[in-house]
Amino acid sequence: MTTRLIAPFVTAAAALTLVTPAAAQKYDFDIQNKPAAPAPVSQAAPDYPSRVRSGQEGWVRVNFIITAGGKAADPIIMNSVGGVVFEDSVMERVPEWRFEPTGEALVDNTTDIRFEIHDGRDLATSNFLRRYRRIVRHLFNEEFLEARTSVNQAAEIGGWNLYESTMLWLMIGRVEGAEGDSTGKLDAYRRALGVSNANSLDGEDRRELLRRLFELEMEHSQFAAADRTLRLLRRETGSEADLEKISGLVADLERNLAGDAAITARATIANPGGGNEGRPLWTYVPARRTFSFAALSGNVERFEVRCERDRLEGPVEAGKAWSLPKGASDCRVFVFGEQGASFGFVEHNENESVDADARTAVARSDVLD
């Protein structure tokens, strides 16, 4: 039995749909490359994992480089739902993808891959509903230990389909928030937004989730991320009331982004799928060209920045400044280390005095093919 469940409070439009008749599986690809990105020549669907329960759905967001010769290289799993087996399937397939050669490397490319079995799966099973309602009841009664136990049990089972996965990560976020863990709450809400679609989050629920994400990103001083979330919220129909609720924070955001002082985002490294497997990382889209690291806690190993045509990587050293070339665009930071390690990601103003030996990015397209 399946039931439509209304969310307690984004997006992945299919750009390409491939069907594998032998396995009767459907895969929707949301290609998030810039409009000028080369057209795919060969982009076969990853195999549906054999080591999952029958009919389970998954979602993976992967970043990769398109070399000058059109090959996909150096994939990084940014986020996922469904378990590491879906990540493994994607990592095996991405190096086989080919794009129209451009003669230069395009470094920052992101693709969402939805492992969907068939249409009409935006429903919750009766078993999931029972687990869901039990967690809601514990939260309502402020039985936080019981809520944690129940949500851990639900997370171990996972969402059978992507609709349930959206609801599960929203509920995980609520439990994290009830426990005072705003970092875990932010991560869970971001995952819920990524895996959701219009059927699992309607307009009102999506607007509320975007508003809460914005508030959490502001709490963590992740101003560039908050700015991107704010732009998404402003594009939502009927968002006027939500924008009014956060008007004070919006003014704070504008002051921080326009100011001369350095801004420090609070960061925690985590596994993309939220479990104990995978490659732990923290990813961020910076607002400024020059950055450094501070307040290192735990094993924070190295970083990589991927821009449209520039790539920069190095060890994480407290106080050491790094700069991207002037004109670098579409940049994304990846920081790797152990699960739970934390640090401050410091973005410096152009006029701020920083390390005179700040290192800059170098093109690496000549070694990728």
Image (cartoon, grey):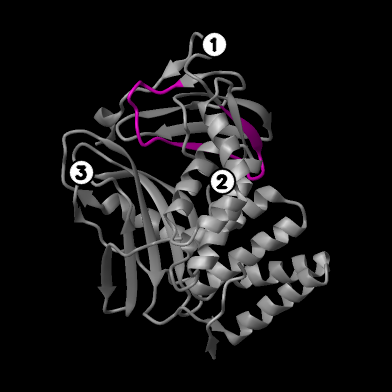
SS for callout 3? loop
Against 260, residue 180 (above or below) is below
The answer to whether residue 47 of the structure is visible from this angle is yes
- What is the CA distance from the residue labelled 3 to the residue labelled 1? 40 Å
Please name which of the two marks, 1 or 2, marks the residue nearer to the observer: 1
SS for callout 1? loop
CB under 8 Å between discs 3 and 1: no
> 10 Å neighbourhood of mark 3: few (<14), some, or many (≥20)?
many
> 10 Å neighbourhood of mark 2: few (<14), some, or many (≥20)?
many
The three-letter amino acid code for the residue at tag 2 is Pro
Please name which of the two marks, 3 or 1, marks the residue nearer to the observer: 1
Is residue 203 magenta-colored? no
Residue 210 falls in image quadrant? bottom right
- What is the CA distance from the residue labelled 1 to the residue labelled 2? 32 Å
Residue 152 falls in image quadrant? bottom right
> 10 Å neighbourhood of mark 1: few (<14), some, or many (≥20)?
few
Q: Which residue is mark 2?
A: 280
Q: Which residue is mark 3?
A: 70
Against 63, residue 148 (above or below) is below
The three-letter amino acid code for the residue at tag 1 is Ser
Outermost residue, top direction?
Answer: 356
Q: Which residue is mark 1?
A: 353
* Identity of the residue drawn at 45% across and 73% down: 199
Of 343 and 22, nearer the camera is 343
Of 115 and 233, nearer the camera is 233
Magenta span covers which residues? 323-346
Q: How far from the left and from the top, in percent, is residue 184?
A: 66, 52
The answer to whether residue 269 of the structure is visible from this angle is no
Is residue 324 magenta-colored? yes
The three-letter amino acid code for the residue at tag 3 is Gly
Is 202 placed left or right of 263 in the picture? left
